[in-house]
Image (tube, rainbow, N blue to C red):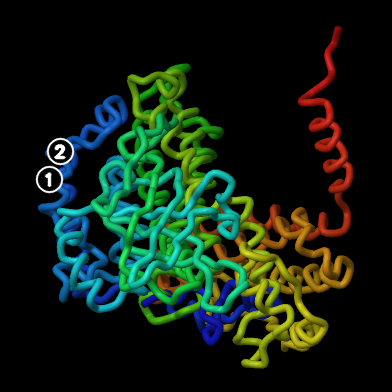
């Protein structure tokens, strides 16, 4: 079971925050075994035979549902049981294999990928990670066959990123709980038969503050769905509200421990973000293929637009960013498959970078398509709408940047050598979304005392310049974070401009590091000329990232943060933009 917030493991992303990248965690770059590759290809071949002839993404978007015959074929292909262990009728795939399948689905249609990942990465994940053997035996076989679909019911009106504000209650009544409340934005909400529901429960101690508990709930227990939400994109995926009115659930349906539902939710979301990142890889690759097709057929001034430097620049930038996204996503899934338990920051980085890469790629691909990209005659208009969701799903990118920064400020277990943080401040930092906290003075001293690396020893010598970027800016990050913590003290939780800069530096450093590990492996296997494509893509990405890193480091001290806050405050007071030329 992945344990995304484990404290006894090491995290490469967190090591960046103390200026000493733990290269042993990412070298050699993970790759599936031959048997795993054959298994993955077997699933992909089935999708590739079926999807081109039978999946009409425009129809799915237009009719706002996935046709029954497509769902039946997906069941036949085993796509609803990819993560379910073989003992319970599933394929028992690892996270890398599963993510690669989600990537393939997203290349054909985002709604298909969403339906599959909402079922497994969200709806079934809590049952897979925290369910008893009895619950798994009861529900997993039929879910693996796709006879029952699953959904994840966490968010409420007024309780999005702030899960602590959930109002749905589960009151103990004998051997059961009675659940009352309403959930919103439930993907698969209109078609699922099984739900992971989060509700407030009172601990045994009288007067104790209610805490979240996770339950597995059957629709037949009294769960009702609201009407389908009319969404901007991903219209084939069912999205509804859920109403739970006096829904009685046996106490045996609790997932994990009573009162520990926040941990369950965070574990599930952390793993799910990697599937979301892989879907961004699939959609981005499709958009680049569309852009290349259009650029090589569209002519102006007597030649194809692919021959013009500004169009070439777009294709180069898109390709380099996809290479970085693909590298970091499958580095992270590889770490999880290898047994790493602390990957929450890496997962958040992949989700943020993946969703923003897809958004940029969708925009640039449509730009290359010209007027055709703005009409419904081509796929760009739909894919732009579909892409917009990823920046909001599974934690908004804004809250995840805060999470990345504040989690990274703990200092990784690798460099702290198990000494840990003081208990009086560590709780909030272990759960930054639930309660933002700060580092103790002891943690500051230990982080500063870490032996700084002056180079990455396992990177191929050809990549020395790009490797130097990682070392240089990891040390800049460590110093900047240390100074920010000293300057702001307890107020660091409110310093979101500072958090964003720290997070953006960590995102770029993790991206470059992932590319370095992957490209080093390629050079070692195929030689420099054989790995020329990887080397070139890494170089393009790293040079662009270096400019962003420089700006972020400088603006830790030289910025207009307070001015921007003041402008925003006035806009709110004015009710919008107040000026006019009249």
At x 74%, y 74%, the residue is: 475
Describe residue 431's horizontal placement relative to residue 262 as left or right: right
Residue 59, picture quadrant: top left
**Would residue 551 be visible to someone looking at this image?**
no
| Image coords of residue 362 (percent x, y) | 46, 36
Pick out the residue farthest to the top. Answer: 582
Q: Which residue is more in the foreground, 89 or 534?
A: 89
Identify the image quadrant of the C terminus.
top right
Name the foreground residue: 328 vs 14: 14
- Real-space Cα separation, disc 2 to disc 1, in angstroms: 6 Å
- Left or right side of 50 for 572: right
Q: Position of residue 156 (x, y in %)?
A: 51, 48
- Is there a contact, CB below 8 Å, between mark 2 and mark 1? yes
How crowded pointer 2 is (Cα within 10 Å; few <14, some 14-19, many 20+) is rated as few
Q: Which mark is residue 72?
A: 1
234 vs 138: above or below: above
Residue projecting furthest to the front: 174
Between residues 55 and 232, which one lies in front from this camera angle? Answer: 232
Q: Which mark is residue 68?
A: 2
């Amino acid at each position: 079971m992945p344990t995304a917030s484990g404290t006894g493991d090491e995290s490469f992303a967190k090591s960046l925050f103390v200026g000493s990248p733990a290269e042993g965690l990412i070298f050699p770059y993970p790759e599936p075994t031959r048997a795993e590759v054959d298994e993955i290809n077997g699933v992909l071949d089935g999708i590739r035979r079926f999807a081109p002839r039978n999946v009409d993404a425009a129809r799915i978007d237009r009719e706002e549902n996935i046709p029954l015959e497509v769902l039946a074929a997906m069941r036949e292909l085993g796509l609803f049981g990819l993560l379910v262990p073989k003992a319970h009728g599933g394929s028992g795939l690892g996270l890398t294999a599963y993510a690669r399948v989600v990537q393939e689905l997203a290349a054909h249609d985002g709604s298909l990928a969403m339906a599959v990942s909402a079922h497994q990465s969200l709806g079934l994940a809590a049952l897979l990670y925290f369910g008893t053997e009895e619950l798994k035996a009861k529900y997993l076989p039929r879910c693996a066959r796709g006879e029952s679909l699953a959904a994840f019911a966490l968010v409420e009106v007024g309780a999005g990123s702030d899960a602590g504000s959930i109002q749905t209650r589960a009151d103990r009544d004998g051997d059961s709980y009675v659940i009352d409340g309403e959930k919103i934005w439930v993907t698969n909400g209109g078609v699922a038969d099984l739900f992971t529901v989060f509700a407030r429960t009172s601990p045994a101690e009288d007067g104790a503050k209610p805490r979240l508990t996770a339950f597995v709930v059957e629709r037949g227990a009294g769960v009702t769905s609201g009407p389908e939400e009319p969404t901007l994109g991903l219209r084939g995926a069912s999205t509804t509200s859920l109403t739970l009115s006096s829904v009685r659930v046996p106490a045996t349906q609790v997932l994990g421990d009573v009162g520990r539902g926040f941990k369950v939710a965070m574990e599930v979301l952390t793993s799910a973000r990697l599937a979301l990142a892989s879907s961004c890889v699939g959609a981005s690759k499709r958009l680049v293929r569309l852009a290349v097709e259009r650029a090589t057929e569209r002519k102006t001034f007597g030649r194809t637009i692919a021959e013009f430097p500004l169009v070439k620049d777009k294709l180069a930038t898109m390709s380099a960013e996809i290479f970085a996204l693909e590298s970091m996503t499958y580095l992270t899934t590889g770490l999880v498959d290898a047994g790493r338990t602390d990957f929450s920051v890496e997962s958040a980085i992949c989700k943020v970078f993946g969703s923003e890469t897809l958004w940029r790629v969708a925009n640039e691909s449509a730009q290359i398509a010209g007027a055709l990209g703005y009409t419904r005659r081509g796929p760009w208009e739909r894919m732009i709408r579909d892409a917009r969701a990823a920046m909001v799903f599974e934690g908004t990118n804004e809250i995840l940047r805060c999470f990345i920064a504040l989690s990274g400020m703990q200092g990784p277990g690798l460099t702290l050598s198990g000494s840990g943080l003081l208990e009086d401040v560590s709780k909030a930092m272990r759960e930054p979304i639930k309660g933002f906290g700060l580092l103790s003075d002891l943690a500051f001293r230990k982080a500063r005392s870490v032996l700084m690396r002056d180079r990455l020893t396992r990177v191929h010598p050809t990549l020395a310049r790009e490797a130097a970027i990682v070392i240089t800016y990891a040390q800049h990050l460590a110093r900047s974070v240390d100074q920010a913590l000293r300057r702001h003290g307890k107020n660091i939780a409110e310093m979101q401009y500072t958090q964003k800069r720290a997070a953006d530096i960590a995102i770029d450093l993790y991206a470059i590091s992932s590319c370095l590990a992957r490209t080093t492996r390629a050079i070692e296997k195929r030689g420099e000329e054989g790995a020329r494509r990887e080397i070139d893509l890494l170089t393009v990405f790293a040079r662009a990232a270096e400019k962003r890193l420089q700006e972020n480091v400088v603006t830790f001290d030289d910025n207009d943060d307070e001015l921007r806050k003041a402008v925003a405050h006035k806009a709110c007071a004015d009710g919008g933009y107040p000026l006019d030329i009249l």
